[in-house]
Image (cartoon, helix red, strand yellow):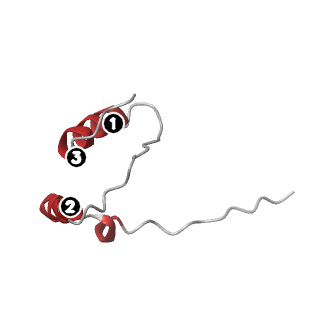
Amino acid sequence: MSTVQATLPEPDHQAELIESSQVLSRIDAAKLANELPRYIAIEGPVGVGKTTLARKLSELLNYPLML
């Protein structure tokens, strides 16, 4: 019996990286335009920093935090 193994291309992480200053300026622009989402859901595996991210976003956007 032969086994077929699919090889996925490596993700281009450089294209996904955005400077934190760019992110902050986008958030400020969204605040001014009143275009922020009503809620944000964060999901992922254990230990990757979901709670830390949620706390930082809640502080930055002045959102209530629900864990």
Kindly check if marks 2 and 3 are in contact, taking CB atoms under 8 A apart as contact.
no
Of labels 2 and 3, earlier in sequence is: 2
State the mark number for residue 61.
3
Q: Quadrant of residue 34?
A: bottom left
Q: Are marks 1 and 2 in contact (CB under 8 Å)?
A: no
In this rendering, is residue 47 above or below 23? above
Contact flag, marks 1 and 3 (Cβ < 8 Å): no
- Image position of 36 (left or right of 61): right
Residue that lies at the very extreme toward the front in this rendered image: 34
Q: Position of residue 61 (x, y in %)?
A: 22, 46
What's under tag 1, amino acid-wise?
Gly
Q: Residues within 10 Å of mark 2 (few under 14, many from 20)?
A: few
**x, y percentage for residue 59?**
19, 38
Badge 1 is on which residue? 49
In the rendered view, tell whether residue 46 sits above or below residue 38.
above
Q: Residue beneath label 2, please? A: 23
Please provide percent x and percent y for residue 56: 22, 39
**Residue density around tag 1, few if under 14, some if 14–19, many if 20 or more, within 10 Å:** few
Q: Amino acid at mark 3?
A: Leu
Q: Which residue is at a point 23% across and 66% down the rendered structure image? A: 33
SS assignment at label 3: helix
